[in-house]
Amino acid sequence: MINEQIRDKEVRLIGEDGEQLGILPLKDAMKMAQEAELDLVKIAPTAKPPVCKIIDYGKYRYELARKEKEAKKKQKVIEIKEVRLSPNIDTNDLNTKVGAARKFLEKGDKVKVTLRFRGREMAHMFKSKYILDDFAESLKDIAVVDKPSKVEGRSMVMFLTAKR
């Protein structure tokens, strides 16, 4: 809130150069802001009494937006990459998929390993669990099993995360 939008009787006022001016009636605080040709901005509305500062409101909003943008730059977005397998996969094909998963993990992404079953393969689901176990075993030097394998519909799913 700025200037006339502030409805409190008393406010704790901070000057334009950051010094504490004490607890003042709102009229006096508004007069001081107008004399400095700046805005009275409520910074901490929940404090008792609320804290207001004499600053240029446009500059204040710009600074907040810039800080928010900097914070977004520093955060890392973790994506979930999927590797799909079938129960009758050969060892060379499995090694290729392990290599792809290794690249994803080195980038810092999570990997979702999906073992898909079709038709009669559904009857022997748990006999194929060793494929996911072998997959996790071959990546144990750089990855940790985040969520162990579980059945979801026609597939068995496992999540891997890179070690820190």
Image (cartoon, helix red, strand yellow):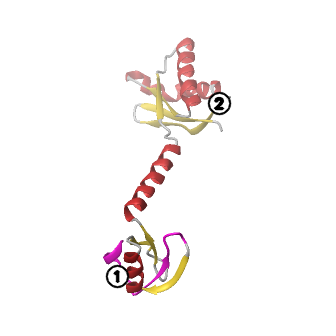
Tell me the kind of residue under disc 1: Arg
Q: Residue 60 falls in which quadrant of the image? A: bottom left
Tell me the crowding category of disc 2: few under 14, some 14 to 19, or many 20 or more residues within 10 angstroms, Cα based.
some
Find disc 1 in the rendering and name its residue: 7
Distance between the alpha carbons at the discs numbered 2 and 1:
58 Å
What are the residue bounds of the magenta stretch? 1-18
Point out residue 37 in the picture as x, y percentages from the top left corner.
Answer: 37, 71
Find disc 2 in the rendering and name its residue: 142
Mark 2 or 1: in front is 1
Tell me the crowding category of disc 1: few under 14, some 14 to 19, or many 20 or more residues within 10 angstroms, Cα based.
few
Q: Residue at x 49, y 43 (%)?
A: 73
Classify mark 1: helix, strand or loop.
loop
Q: Residue at x 47, y 83 (%)?
A: 49
**Which residue is more in the foreground, 101 or 158?**
101
Point out residue 32 in the picture as x, y percentages from the top left corner.
Answer: 42, 79
Classify mark 2: helix, strand or loop.
loop
Q: Residue 138 falls in which quadrant of the image? A: top right
Assess whether residue 11 is covered by the magenta stretch: yes
